[in-house]
Amino acid sequence: MNTSNHEIWGFITRNESKKVPEWICKMHTLNVDDLVRDQQFRAELKKVTPSYLEHLREQIGLQARGLEWSEILKNRLKALEPYLEVFIVWVIISVNNRTVTLEIDPNTDTIIHIEEY
């Protein structure tokens, strides 16, 4: 996968993995440049670092935002641990008070993890 916003947006809205929420797929006709401009779409290539995984473990242990949030973090940690020291694409889509975050392996075009708020 090319890591341009256009390529990522197309990949997400095609939803070939059937993991992406339907409301995101219905937005396939929107221009990703407009979404970026309006701060509704952000994609970054980042490395999964030991310090980030340790941060997740600490937050899980603290349960500072409650049990439900700790479960979300546990799922994220479990999904990301196999990608330690690997660059992945982190995507945030936030439209009409709904937010989805996705982590994507750009080498295999695999959606690693999705969270919806």
Image (spheres, rainbow, N blue to C red):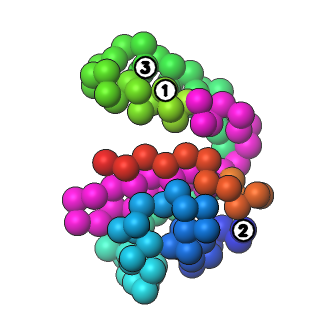
Q: Nearer the viewer, mark 3 or mark 1?
A: 1
Residue 42, placed above or below residue 78: below
Instruction: Please tell me whether mark 2 sits on a helix, a strand or a loop.
Output: loop
Q: Amino acid at mark 2?
A: Met
Instruction: Please tell me whether mark 1 sits on a helix, a strand or a loop.
Output: helix
Q: CA gap, disc 2 to disc 3? A: 32 Å
Dot 3: within a 10 Å radius of its alpha carbon, few (fewer than 14), some, or many (20 or more) residues?
Answer: many
Image point 55% across, 68% down: which residue?
Answer: 15
Q: Nearer the viewer, residue 105 or 39?
A: 105
Image-based side of 52 in relation to 109, left or right: left
Instruction: For residue 98, say whether it is visible.
Output: yes
Q: Amino acid at mark 3?
A: Ile
Q: CA gap, disc 1 to disc 2? A: 27 Å
Specify the label residue 60 is tagged with.
Answer: 3
Instruction: Please tell me whether mark 3 sits on a helix, a strand or a loop.
Output: helix
Callout 3–callout 1 Cβ contact below 8 Å: yes
In magenta, the rendered stretch is 78-104
Instruction: For residue 36, say whether it is visible.
Output: no
Magenta-colored stretch includes residue 80: yes
Image point 43% across, 86% down: which residue?
Answer: 29
Residue 100 location (% of width, % of height):
39, 55
Which residue is tagged 2?
Answer: 1
Precedes in sequence: disc 2 or disc 3: 2
Q: Nearer the viewer, mark 1 or mark 2?
A: 1
Which residue is tagged 1?
Answer: 74
Residue farthest along the right direction in this orientation: 107
